[in-house]
Amino acid sequence: MNTTTEKDIVNILWKALKHVAIENDNSIDNQITVNIKKINDKQEVKITKAEIIAFVNDQIHKFHSVNGVYYCSDHIEYTVIAREKYRPSLAPFAWPEDIPFTEQNKYKYGLSQISLGLFFKFLKEVTLDTNFIVQNIFTNSFYMGIFNDSGTAIDLFDKEINLYNIVDSLLQRSVKQYLMAIKIEPNDDSEKANISNNIKKYKKMAESAMFNVNLANFHGFSLRYLEHPLIAITDSNNMKKINGKRMTAPHMVYNHDMLEIYTAGNWHDDPLVQFINYYQVAEYLFNYVPNELLFEEVQEKIASPKFSYTDKSDVLELSRLIADLNRKNDKEVNSLRMVLNQYVKYDDLKKSLPDKLINYYRDEIPSFLKNTSEPNQIKFSINNLKNSDKVYGKMASRLYAVRNCLVHNKEGENHFNSLIDDESLKKEVPLMKAIAETVIIKYGTTI
């Protein structure tokens, strides 16, 4: 399926405008009249489709991106989404105007919905059919029918009457309300002209501004940076998977603690939280699996007719075996390898992971593990699981290295920076999730 085009955006916008248009303009093709309301004024405005085409084209090409920061000729936009502190749902930006920061000096700081040009730019990244976009992006569930009330006035409050504000007001209650930005505009014109050369500085300023918003607990918001927020919100692939599957009654019961940990991972969209929770599902068995293997080996040894408890050499050999196994079990990475070896097989991962990721694990390592001394020891081929135990060792080493990087932050060692490394970590999450699901299922019991 192709990504959304400028033509798609124009057609959707035109359809939206026609739904709120006054029904007396049908004699003129590709021209409509809409009611515009301001605080103390109300008037009719004519809009042509040609104007919308030119407008969308102009807005999309206003914005550029460097190092995860979007900028145009006079300001930068640092894209964020917000969660309400005591609710898991996304928080909308419901104010009609940008909210300025206090104590501003050389720069104007503001929090608002993203600009239209950036919204259109994000729409072009989404691979969804037009009907899905109309139903799920432009028509928010809280405002069903927003585009189906002919003659409804578009409220501009005290904004100037122009095409930008008309379209922006029309879309304010769409999914655009969840796409926010910290905007920074320099007051000095010469600095505006040099924005593109100072993106690193503006990114640090925006990160600091986001911290201040979170520190102030502004309206209960918790802001989080996302470079591609619309893709994260719509997540079209997941939508299709969900819509295409039936819910089946369970034939097994699963460990309660494992389910709670796994559900905690599913509850969040932060890849760090997801990975750690899925890792903890496997970690739950770090004592059980080694102890079971130890029991089996010791039981097999003492059950052998060749073993004699009165033979000193036999007893010493058994004690050395137990000591050696316990020494190996002391290392967490070895416990992880044992869990993987015990529960995770080739088919489990092959069915759960796309070929693109399988090739990624074979050929590449996460960006935040770039200082690893032996990178080839954390690359592995899932296709070799069927005939090589070494693969389990490499898989365990990779997952353990990722885990350590997320929970530790020692100077001079690999460390994870969520603002830079999120996209890289997201590629590790499906593997850890597939392993967690497989462990839960195979550790379960039939009803």
Image (cartoon, helix red, strand yellow):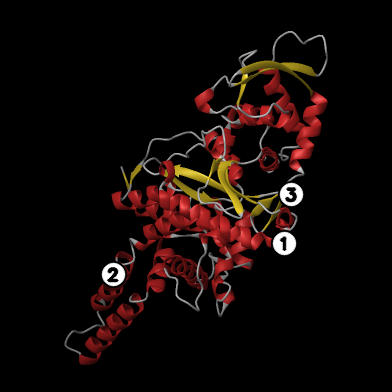
| x and y percentages locating residue 282 in the rendered image | 38, 60
Q: Residue at x 27, y 71 (%)?
A: 295
Mark toward the viewer: 3 or 2:
3
The residue that mark 2 highlights is: 291
Determine whether, in the image, residue 294 is placed left or right of residue 242.
left
Residue 357 vs 268, above or below: the answer is below
The residue that mark 3 highlights is: 73
Give the spatial CA distance, label 1 vs label 3: 12 Å
| x and y percentages locating residue 231 in the rendered image | 60, 44
- Residue type at mark 2 is Asn
- Can the viewer see residue 38? yes
- Are dots 1 and 3 in contact, CB under 8 Å? no
| x and y percentages locating residue 417 in the rendered image | 52, 64
Determine whether, in the image, residue 338 is placed left or right of residue 62.
left
Indicate which disc, 1 or 2, sits on the residue closer to the N terminus: 1
Determine whether, in the image, residue 192 is placed left or right of residue 93.
right
Q: Nearer the viewer, residue 73 or 354?
A: 73
Residue 67 vs 129, above or below: the answer is below
Badge 2 marks a residue whose secondary structure is helix
Badge 1 marks a residue whose secondary structure is helix
Residue 139 vs 421, above or below: the answer is above
